[in-house]
Image (cartoon, rainbow, N blue to C red):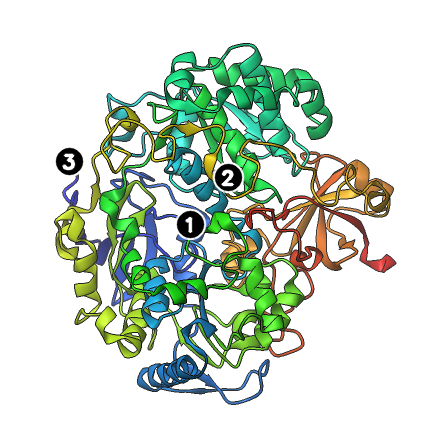
Amino acid sequence: MDKNEGKWTWEEDGMKVVRSVARTGPGCHYGCGVLLYVKDDKLIKVEGDPEFPINKGSLCPRCTALTEVVYHPDRLKYPLKRIGERGEDKWERITWEEAFDNIADKFNEIRSKYGPESVFFCQGTARDVGVYQNNLAYSFGSPNTLAFGPLHGHACHVPRVITTKITTGVYEFPDYSQFFPNTHENTNWRMPKCIMIWGNEPTASTSPGSMGYLLMECIKRGAELIVIDPRKTWVAARAKMWLQIRPGTDAALALGMLNVIINEKLYDEEFVRDWTYGFDELKKRVQEYPPEKASKITWIPEEQIIAAARMYAASEPAAIQWGVAVDQTKECIPTIHAIISLWSMTGNMDAPGGNVIGSGLFGLGQHGGSQYDNLNEERKRNKIGAGMYPLFDYGYRMPPGAQLTEQLLSGEPYPLKAAWIQSTNTFACGAADSRRVYEGFKKLGFVVVVDLFMTPTAMAFADIILPAATYPERDGIGLVGSICVGTTNKAIKPVEEVKSDMEINFELGKRLNPGAWPWKDVREMFNSMLEPTGMTFEELRDKGYLYDKFQYKKYEKGLLRTDGKPGFATPTGKVELYSTILEKCNLDPLPYFEEPPESPVSTPELAEEYPFILTTGAKTPVFFHSEHRQIPSLRRLNPEPITEIHPDAAAKLCIKEGDWIYIENRYGRCRQKARLTERIDPRVVHSQHGWWFPEKSGPEPSLFGVWESNINLLLPAGMVGKSGFGYPFKAQICRVYPVEEA
């Protein structure tokens, strides 16, 4: 037994070691266990915590580069107030008291003149601030709080959450043993014989609820892979089957596989009979998608579709890990519905080694709901885009992201006057039609930005900038998905005057609505939030981490419904292969495929001019969306924006490895460097997203070179799905050519 096992801090080799959970900032999607080594109150190095069950000592490059982030010379260190025009790099340093008072006065003035809904609140993905910022917005009285900012179609994880909620009642995760502290040694767990990785690269990006390390352990132990991806990724190269899909056609593939599984009776007849609703309707629908037709749509050979369907259905158990790619098609809801049907019909629903329902984590994920409940009905009806998309009324409180931009520009049905932007980079990262988003935000009268560094968003819009702390500089509660809860433990004195996101929200919240923030300090707030666990922050810190009780097949035990009866929390009490909620929303209640808005099939004449399918947004191991571009060790690994193109296609265009090229369509163009690779189809190119250049000029018009390589300049507004969810980030069309030919 290690002498330091179970301790949260100790001395080692003349250094203080602090056990923590790596929650943002800087960017991190989940929360691995880390050991922070400190000397003279300075962070020296970061190592993985071998005792933390989720990552067991493994870390990504972003984690190991943490010291470069914390002590970077360009970090924001003090509150700043703009003294020049928007877009000018002219600021004065102010105190935190001045900043909070200024913001509170301005927000209160706007609230009294225009109503609280005229102020909206944006947050970045997985920033560990969601609950705090939501409470800040709702306690202020505004219903307008948005994850990811103006992300079109909320096309990142949210569509999967919504679709699972309306069809099964709750979100499901692939089961890699992550719900048990002893992981693979737990006797109740079974290893998936087959894992289908759909639109995800777990070595670079971890899907919510499924940590990459544990997946790799399953692969080492013999789990076989089916990988669905337009690019031959690291896992695709190691898969038994790689299905190289045409971007944007995932629904056709899923329906083709369902056709095989249903017609060959490879499904779990008992589960389908007892626990699903709408099988006959789905059976009829999939007859429209025989493997031959699915092959023509997807470019995947018919025999591969059949073999993959048989392999998945015959493997007992089998799991599906999906990524953001399934959200990033225009009609993503039917795509997701079809994939849910695959694991439901094969009996892999909440079964060991299948796709399982999380533990609930003591209900901690819902602790931001109370302030929303305090909004009156009039305030809720004033949400941006209210009434536009009926599906938004089913368990989703945020407004449609694309509609935010439209209302900023039109001022209808009411003008938006101010924004709180916390750790998100708006037009430089997640939003389609970047220039339109930029013009919309420019119309605001007052903007506050909270971040670690000066970004294009902060330079362009901010009137006040608040410097955020990194996770070694603050305490926090680390909710690791629906898996476990631990603590982020402060290891060092904060650099200069930075504050944690939680402190910032807390201090401003007390000024805007003291009754909604009754705690004396942030630590007391943490203790209040942890009440369902029966532990205080200090007790949890000493314990290290805490798992909720986990059981399989909860639907048989009455653990999913509020009435305690067996079944699922859906209107029919069953997994809805035919969705009654979608039907009520005047949407197709069954899965279907719709061709991307612009493609070789839907717009063949346009495709003559723009012959490549453009797919974007695949994660890299070294960047988190638009973050880390100023971190030397990470930037060396990916120094320039990259567009991948097949050598045969490049040769026809006289493009060589490393050439600067333009990627262009009728909406815009940007330039990136060509990387020639045979791991992509000659008809497809892939371009990295989130690119800006911290080393370039900050003030307008440059904004750190954000208009040079931003692939979202090619992505137009107006392509959101019928449900309000989904956008074809991964299925546009374009042409490419060398920069010299421009």
Image depth: mark 2 or mark 1 in front: 2
Quadrant of the frame with the C terminus: bottom right
Q: Disc 2 marks which amino acid?
A: Leu
Among numbered discs 1 and 3, the one appearing first in the sequence: 3
Q: Disc 1 marks which amino acid?
A: His
Q: Disc 3 marks which amino acid?
A: Met
Image depth: mark 1 or mark 3 in front: 1
In front of the other: 428 or 530:
530
- Residue 236 vs 475, above or below: the answer is above
* Residue 538 in picture, x, y percent from top left: 14, 56
Among numbered discs 2 and 1, the one appearing first in the sequence: 1
Disc ID at residue 1: 3
Residue at x-position 34% and y-position 35%: 569
In front of the other: 159 or 101:
159
Residue, disc 2: 582
Secondary structure at badge 3 equals loop
Residue, disc 1: 29
